[in-house]
Amino acid sequence: RIVYLNGRYLEEHRAQVSVFDRGFLFADAVYEVTAVLNSKLIDFAGHFARLQRSCTELGLTLPVSEQQLRDIHQELLIRNQLHEGGIYLQLTRGSAGDRDFCAPADLSPTLLLFTQARPLKDAPQASAGIHVVSLPDIRWHRRDIKTVQLLAPCLAKELAHARGADDAWLVEDGFVTEGSSSNAYIVTADGTVVTRPLSNDILHGITRQALMQLAADGGIKVEERAFTIAEALAAKEAFISSATTVVWPVVSIDGQTIGDGKPGPVSLRLRQRYLQLAEQSTQG
Ligand code: PMP
């Protein structure tokens, strides 16, 4: 696999980052994942806008323009012949050549990108649905910034797998915040899609933003409010969204079936519409 590191395209085993890189020592870094379908980027502009926002919040400076970054994504997917999957981007504050909590102002950031081939359109989870468990949300209070400090979601996913589930829904003060690496939704008895409003409590999903628009365009009512696990258990449908899953129906929570235990029509409709538009678009 060819990866991009600080201006160069390298075989993955040749790409090296300093052991003093602040991304490694302090998780002082942000990331993005842009999905690829039919060798095209999906919603690159949205991911770039969020990357810029994450950088601004942390006082990081992006070393490349939007067009340059788009070109790097394109070049990387061509070099790796990526048809379907995602492109991972990480930007760290760089290395000061030692470990110090306070970073000097003049560091050169580290920019890394690599491709990941995986099924997006025909992922088995999309047709079978996934099983989730609820876990306490132990993350920090700026979940709106897409940082690489992902230990809490790693542990949540591990715990979910240990309990025989696919993923976790995180709960804070009695309400679902989001999935361990996705936004969370339910569909109520009257067909309304309910999802938590944007705040510092959740990541502002790019897929979420697109789905909100698709729902509005398709006459599906959306309510942005927090919901409990009890409400989710009584819902007709539940689902998650993210760039790498698009929409995956949730068919059980904590071992209890949602609706009839099968992926629901609203979840599948939103998924199909999103993929259809992604395939029709000429630019990410
Ligand atoms: N919430 C969290 C915690 C995530 O990690 C992700 C995926 N990165 C999302 C939501 C979904 O965001 P997006 O649709 O932009 O992939």
Image (cartoon, grey):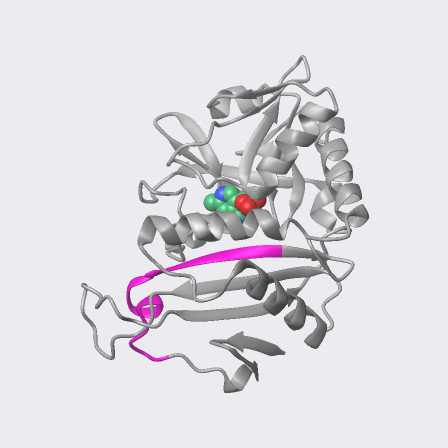
Instruction: Answer whether residue 82 is magenta in the image.
Output: no
Using the image as rendered, state which of residue 252 and residue 263 is in the foreground. 263
To which quarter of the image does residue 149 belong?
bottom left
Residue span colored magenta = 18-34
State the residue in front, 240 or 259: 240
Residue 266 against residue 88 in the figure, above or below: above
> Who's the residue at 49% across and 82% down the image?
15
Q: Position of residue 7 (x, y in %)?
A: 50, 77
Indicate the quadrant where residue 20 lies: bottom left
Q: Nearer the viewer, residue 251 or 66?
A: 66
Quarter placement of the N terminus: bottom right
Q: Does the magenta stretch include residue 30?
A: yes
Please indicate whether residue 9 sits to the left or right of residue 105 in the image.
right
Residue drawn at the location 42% of the way across and 38% of the way down: 135
Is residue 119 visible in the rendered image? The answer is yes
Count the numbered circles shown: 0
Q: Where is residue 183 in the image (x, y as percent from the top left)?
A: 53, 38
* Residue 9 appears left or right of 51: right
